[in-house]
Image: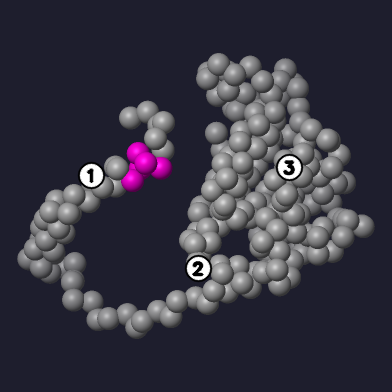
Amino acid sequence: MGRWSFIRMLGKHGRQIVLVSAYQVCNQRANQVGDRTAFAQQLSLLRRNGKDCSPRKSFFDDLDTKIEEWREKEYEIILSGDLNEELGADVHGFARISAKHDLVEVIQHQHGTTDEPPTYARGSRRLDYVFCTPNLVPSIVSCGILPYSKIIDSDHRAIYVDFCTSTLIGGDLASLSATPVRILKSRDSKASEAYVEAVAKYMEDNRVLQRLMEVSEAEHPNQEK
């Protein structure tokens, strides 16, 4: 539904970090929004799936469930996004989720809440935030809110967080060996054909596709085929 996307990064000593980019639709009435707005699109998808609720309520409920799932697996989390709300203004809003899962708002933790600038050009409140789990706070080197269009042209301010990489991932980065001279050349049709056949044979001999399916089913046991 386009509400959030994430990647999971494997660090050292078993540390796993989920990086989440989220977007929460504006607080609007269903009968007053345009047909092409994100609110209307999400509402339509919810109703198609038998859910007659506000896209904002669905966002909070579903993200809450997802964060709980990640925390049960002991994943660390970095979550940033346009929440379209002032943190703490609504007790039923994102402040409830951040308090429940002990998420730290990075900018406020480092700089306090006094004189926070608005982050939307046509608004007067801060709407954009970045959170992390407590174990990641010691890895923060610096953070801040930039002027409008400092990095790219946008009606939102950019927010940045600089992490100490070794502290963040739980150890020093692996040293990369020098790139060897490429033996395979794609313009060599005979060599390319032999390479493709060798890879196909290797995948078949080692049941690569079947093993990938087994891993996927183990990760998502209730997913319909």
Q: Which residue ends up furthest to the right in the rendered image?
A: 114
- Residue linked to disc 1: 210
- The residues colored magenta run 215-219
**Which of label 1 and label 2 is nearer to you?**
2
Q: Could you say which quadrant of the image residue 122 lies in? A: top right
C-alpha separation, residue under disc 3 versus residue under disc 1: 40 Å
Residue at x 74%, y 54% (from the top left corner): 104
Q: Which secondary structure, mark 3?
A: helix
Marks 3 and 1: which is nearer the front? 3
Q: Are marks 3 and 2 in contact (CB under 8 Å)?
A: no
Q: Does the magenta portion include 216?
A: yes
Mark 2 — residue?
A: 12
* Residue 96 visible in rendering: yes
User: Regarding mark 2 in the picture, which secondary structure is present there?
Assistant: loop
Snapshot quadrant of residue 90: top right
Q: CA distance from mark 1 to mark 2?
A: 28 Å
**Overall secondary structure of the magenta section:** helix
Q: Position of residue 101 (x, y in %)?
A: 70, 45
Crowding near pointer 3: few (<14 within 10 Å), some, many (20+)? Answer: few
Quarter of the picture containing the N terminus is: top right
Task: Report if residue 171 lies within the magenta region.
Answer: no
Local crowd size for mark 1, using a 10 Å CA cut-off: few (<14), some (14–19), many (≥20):
few
**Residue 136 x/y as whole percent:** 66, 63
Circle 2: is it few (<14), some (14-19), or many (20+) Cα within 10 Å? Answer: some
Tell me which residue sits at (76%, 27%) in the image: 28
**What's the amino acid at mark 3?**
Lys
Please tell me which residue lies in front, 117 or 75. 75
What residue is pinned by disc 3? Answer: 100
State whether residue 149 appears in this view.
no
Instruction: Give percent across and percent down for residue 72.
Output: 57, 45
Tell me the element at label 1: helix
Q: Earlier in the sequence, mark 3 or mark 1?
A: 3
